[in-house]
Amino acid sequence: MLTEKTHPEKIILISYIIVVGFLILLMRLWQLQILQGEEYRKIAESNRLRIIGVPAPRGIIFDRNGIPLVKNAPYFCASLIPGEFNAASVPSLARVLNMPEEELARKIQKKGLSPFSPVRVKEGLSFKEVSFIEARRSDFPGLIMEIEVSRDYIYGGTGAHVVGYLGKLSPGQSKDPEFRDVPPEAFIGQWGIEKLYDKKLRGIAGQRMIEVDALGRELRLIKENPPVKGEDLSLSIDIALQNEAEKAFDGRTGALVALQPDTGEILGLVSSPSFNPNMFATGISNADWASLSQDKKLPMLNRAVQSQYPPGSTFKIVMAIAALEEGVLNDSTTVDCRGGISYGKWSFGCWRKTGHNTVSLHRALVESCDVYFYEAGKRLGIDRIHDYATRFGLGMETGIQLAAEKKGLIPNSRWKMEAKKSPWYLGETFVNSIGQGYVSTTPLQMAVMMSAVSSGGNIFKPLILKDSKPELIKNAGVKPGTLDIVKDYLRGVVNEPGGTGWIAKSAVTTIGGKTGTAQVVGIRRDSKFLAEQFRDHAWFVAFAPVEKPEIAMAVLVEHGGHGGSAAAPIAKKAIEAYMLSAEKKKELLNVQN
């Protein structure tokens, strides 16, 4: 108590101290209740409420006939809420999870973690592991099981370069506003259709608010926002065609593209070798990724779109059309083939060393006479050849969105001067006239060319979704009569005696086409000990039925040798699979109705 002897100064000092104390208390209360009130309210709620994300079922991807190519699969994860978990239980929990103690401790002690947000400690659990952990979960407060949606790719590597695969957000993607609503541990499309249409397929995740007790046991459901399933997609590809084509490659390297001539829809797209997207479905291991990325055959490369090759004798289709249109040759013009020609000190041979004797344009295409097309190239000149090749979509991007495509090259005299600082020579025209030299194309471009030849010259943008509105890029501007003549000659390549594509002759439909053998290096083709990497590339381009084309195609087998023996049988199997009825296709694929 204060006495009469207490000095007034002391009374004033004590009063100041009391006032300051009250002010500090008031400021602290203001800080706790006003500034940080919402934060502490959430923490208090988290002590009794748990918010669990509910992943949305991803949309299913179907082929053009309604056959599912994927199905959703659960992806189980064990997670911990650090604020509810007793760190002394790390050794025993590590044994239950069958993981190293050090790894578990590192994950739950990571800096910056919220004590009330789940931390994933083990992913990709099997049903057996989930059952084992669930039976012991009550011993570990804060331990919860989470479920994500992953994929099961029904046909494995078949169509992998089209369908694609899922993966977790990369560091760059996690900062992208496009993925701001995607949980950091969710799977998103990282390749092919899964990536191109990820937002449609992804759906909208839901939430469940659950009341829990002090041990983390669920008491009751407070509130639920159900997830919204992603949109289903029907692709333009025919999985029966795709499956038969990939089997026909039988491990060889190459590509196939099949198109619907009057719409541009992609009926099949093969890049061989392929990869199994199921390797990515639950997170690819370092060993598996190293195996894929270091494979010298480059299974992750989409050869149909991203690789460029000399088209070889398939380029003679463009040469025939150009020669007829320009009037430098007609269907009765003949050339005498004695196995090659000489130009100055250079010789340009025909693939048949004994020659074809006297041939017309018809027989020149059917038997693929090089000498005839040397003459055609001489009369046309490289600039007119360039004009007609580009009219049919060669040497330019098609606009496909599936992958970053290569452009290829169709040379002309201007290009030679700009790129090589040299004029164009007639000898180069001879070589380019048979699809060698500087000419390079992609399998997709060759399929577009065949589609245009079979559909009146129409060039469509390649489309990957069924029933998409056709996008006509241009018309090649060639007389219908010219195309009819060439199509008839291409029928002969497969169906007439002496035709280089006779192996593709079918009892199911009438196939027209053209073989091609593209030289890789300038060495003797008949070498008995030629290493595979030096062997010629094998081409076959085709369409069917000749009378009313429903499918156009290009097949390339790297280092396959002759187009007639290596590529034509693949095209035949793919076309015949496409011509099957819907029920027969299901039988072929062993699909249950």
Image (cartoon, grey):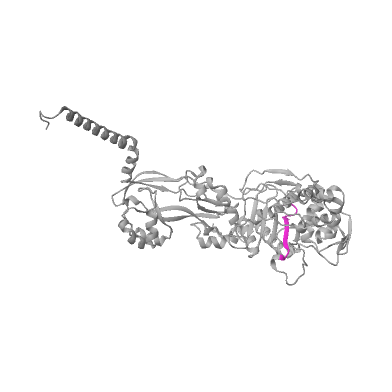
**Image position, residue 48 (x, y; %):** 31, 46
| Residue 95 visible, this orientation | yes
Image-quadrant location for residue 523: bottom right
| Residue 79 visible, this orientation | no
Which is more toward the observer, 323 or 117?
A: 117
**Image position, residue 143 (x, y; %):** 35, 54
Which is more toward the observer, 194 or 487?
A: 194
Image-quadrant location for residue 490: bottom right
* The magenta stretch spans residue 543: yes
The quadrant of the rendering that contains the C terminus is bottom right
The quadrant of the rendering that contains the N terminus is top left
Image-quadrant location for residue 277: bottom right
Residue at 56 percent of width and 47 percent of height: 197
- Side (left or right) of 369 relative to 46: right
Relative to 399, say whether 75 is above or below.
Answer: below
**Image position, residue 135 (x, y; %):** 33, 59
- Side (left or right) of 413 relative to 222: right
* The magenta stretch spans residue 264: no
Residue at 85 percent of width and 67 percent of height: 354
**Image position, residue 226 (x, y; %):** 42, 45
Q: Which portion, as a residue range, is magenta?
A: 534-549
Which is more toward the observer, 575 or 447?
A: 447
